[in-house]
Image (spheres, grey):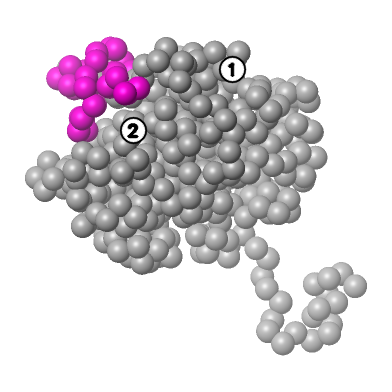
Amino acid sequence: MSVLGLSCTRCNAQYPIGPLFYGCPACHKKGLGGALTVVYDYPAIAKTLDREAWGRHSHSIWRFKDLLPVQDPAFQISLGEGNTALVQPRVVCETAGLPRLYIKNETTNPTWAFKDRFHASSISMAKAMGYTKVTASTTGNHGASTAAYSAAAGMKTCAILCHPESSPLQRNIIRMYGGHAFVLENRYQYLETFVNDHGFYPSTTMEPMPVGTPFGIEGYKTIAFEVYAQLGGKTPDRMFFPIAAGDVLYGPWKGFRELKQLGIADRLPVLHGIQPAGCNPYVQSFRQGLHDVITHPDPRSIALSIRDDMGGRPALEALYESGGDASDVSEEEIVEAVHLLARSGFLVEPSSAASVAGAVKAGRQGRISRDDTVVCIVTGSGAKWPEVVEKLVPSPTPVEPTWDDICRELGL
């Protein structure tokens, strides 16, 4: 058994694997909210690790099972997530002046978002621990993925608490999977009630609290494993992430650290966390040298999925440890990145484009060497946000256009 238990990211206290949804009990008593993370027997894993299985063309994160929390195949839920493409978006590379820039295209996961890696791990653990009811809070992608994996796991009840500005399409997707979508302003109050009073498993972020799970970010580690393999056994120089709670940054960081600990990788990437200027608690915290993320009042941005007013300490610490930084981008820069990706052949939501916006900005400012291998994590498809896409495209030519209308649009 390679899983040893849980460890507090703040005080290093050790606990057995179990439903500890308020983080480290010792830190919780002190009002500190230390997040928990899964720890493994790395020397034992190094002796038996099947590297060939990692290289197989498999659409499932469970080919990395040695470094995932659910060891019993009977509880390993998959919808064919992972093994997403690492590709170079032509127009983005040209605009940024970065010929070795790649995107990790997470829009090709089963529910068209990176969240599928999270829930493949998280819901599998819920099933292994005997849960039959799942809940989550969402702006869209997280809830749709929770509902899909709850359906795959045969959960009896899936209750999703939706942000008021979440897309109606996303809510209908949740309902199609058999979940219950409730639109609420105060989502976290109900989240705690479901968990504490009604026995729901919270498939939520690692941190910040009120409730969280340490098991979902283990799925995000597989991004690091895939990127390393796709680059021919090399670590990228820099990685750019759109961040809100920060799980999608901390997960791959943990993955690369494990590769180094196992003697597979010889170095770690520099991490860059990107946020919209209208909601940048990590950026403000990083600039002040803080080690806990502040709360951003009145957050505003077109990038709803990363418009969280606070974030998690583990991701902030990862930025410091990697030698990277947190930086913000304007609404105009986010929209430009959406269009640059579209002209490269990729349709993404604004939040997903933030990582690319950050890389383009850094490239233009000369803060990245042209020789650096840069990977931007692109998290979710624009097809799930039709209202936003409609605002970003030019007014359509009328139905049954005249020849003059056609010529005018084509510039003939």
Q: In the image, is residue 119 above or below residue 347?
A: above
Residue closer to the observer: 149 or 175: 149
Q: Position of residue 180 (x, y in %)?
A: 26, 61
Q: Which residue is pictured at 73% across the width and 30% down the height? A: 363
Q: Residues within 10 Å of mark 2 (few under 14, many from 20)?
A: some
Q: Which residue is pictured at 68% across the width and 49% down the height? A: 341
Q: Earlier in the sequence, mark 1 or mark 2?
A: 2
Quarter holding residue 216 = top left
Q: In the image, is residue 22 above or below residue 137?
A: above
Q: Secondary structure at mark 2?
A: loop
| Residue 369 seen anywhere in this rendered image of the structure | yes
Q: Residues within 10 Å of mark 1 (few under 14, many from 20)?
A: some
Of the 4 image quadrants, the one containing the N terminus is top left
Residue closer to the observer: 304 or 197: 197
Q: Amino acid at mark 2?
A: Gln
Dot 2 corresponds to which residue?
Answer: 71
Q: Secondary structure at mark 1?
A: loop
Dot 1 corresponds to which residue?
Answer: 265
Q: Which residue is pictured at 71% across the width and 48% down the height? A: 340
Q: Position of residue 252 (x, y in %)?
A: 50, 29
Bounds of the magenta segment: 1-29
Q: Position of residue 5 (x, y in %)?
A: 27, 21
Magenta span includes 9:
yes
Quarter holding residue 239 = top right
